[in-house]
Amino acid sequence: MDAVATLDHVVRRDRLLVGLGLAAMTALAWVYLARAAAGMDAMAADARMHAAMGMADMRAWGIADWAGLLTMWTVMMVAMMLPSAAPVILLVLGVYRRRNDPQARIASIAFVTGYLAAWTAFSVAAASTQLVLHRAALLSADMRIGAAGVSGVVLIVAGLYQWLPLKQMCLTHCQSPFGFLSRYWAEGAGGGFGLGFRHGMFCVGCCWLLMTLLFVVGVMNLWWVAALAGFVLLEKLLRGGALFGRLAGSAAVTWGAYLVLTR
């Protein structure tokens, strides 16, 4: 009993430390986003003023701009996705500890790293898409798609995706971590990274089109960023998360159809 009690104490202590670390990472990410949003608001105001004076900024974005966008998207994914992944991360830590893995902490950190690597890969695609949209003059000064019809199409596609089998399969893996872990479990730091990356890819498959809605409502609109992060959390944790997601998908399709038909 003493050994079991000691192990339980170690698991609780490690979960507390990792939980505090995740909370700190999330808080720092939101602080960065708040500062970045303030800077972008100032830039958007300048752009609108220049446009009113007939001095529109025609400078093409380059590699430095893309790198800045990549950083912004990566930090945004940390802020939005770590809270919904925290239960799985803490579960993984506990399993490593209870299996007496000597690399339990390192493997758990590797799991988080792999998870974030998957979302970094998504961020590369998102930053590249934003660069293309800017070069095509489809983005407004506040980083929204300027054409209502295009915004409507994005909303319709994102809403319909909520009903597709692929979405439901990915959501099931996110909602049922025990099944995921029993199927894909691997030991050690390398195994933890691979496990985290695989779980992250399921999360990307579940949520990537939701993230594209930021091009409709404003990439740095923090109210919408927070709303989407809350939606992802509820969709994963609620017993009726799949139904909740489908209803939201229907609302997105309705909104998108309205924009397309009234443009």
Image (cartoon, helix red, strand yellow):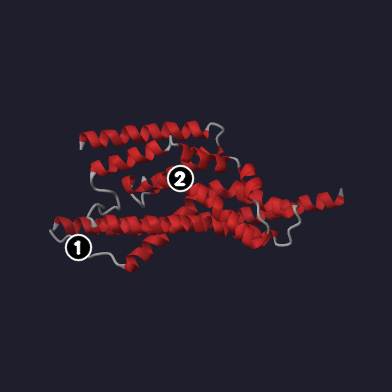
The 10 Å Cα crowd at callout 2, few under 14, some 14 to 19, many 20 or more, is many
Residue 76 lies, in percent from the top left, at 44, 54
Q: Can see residue 35? A: no
Q: Can see residue 259? A: yes
Three-letter amino acid code of the residue under disc 2 = Cys
**On screen, residue 257 above or below 33:** above
Question: Is 240 positioned to the left or the right of 99 in the image?
Answer: left
Point 55% across, 43% down: residue? 174
Kindly report which numbered mark, 2 or 1, lies closer to the viewer in this rendering.
2
User: Which dot marks residue 216?
Assistant: none
User: Which residue is label 2 attached to?
Assistant: 207
Label tally: 2
The 10 Å Cα crowd at callout 1, few under 14, some 14 to 19, many 20 or more, is few
Question: Is 8 positioned to the left or the right of 55 in the image?
Answer: right
Point 61% across, 55% down: residue? 20
Three-letter amino acid code of the residue under disc 1 = Met
User: Which residue is label 1 attached to?
Assistant: 58
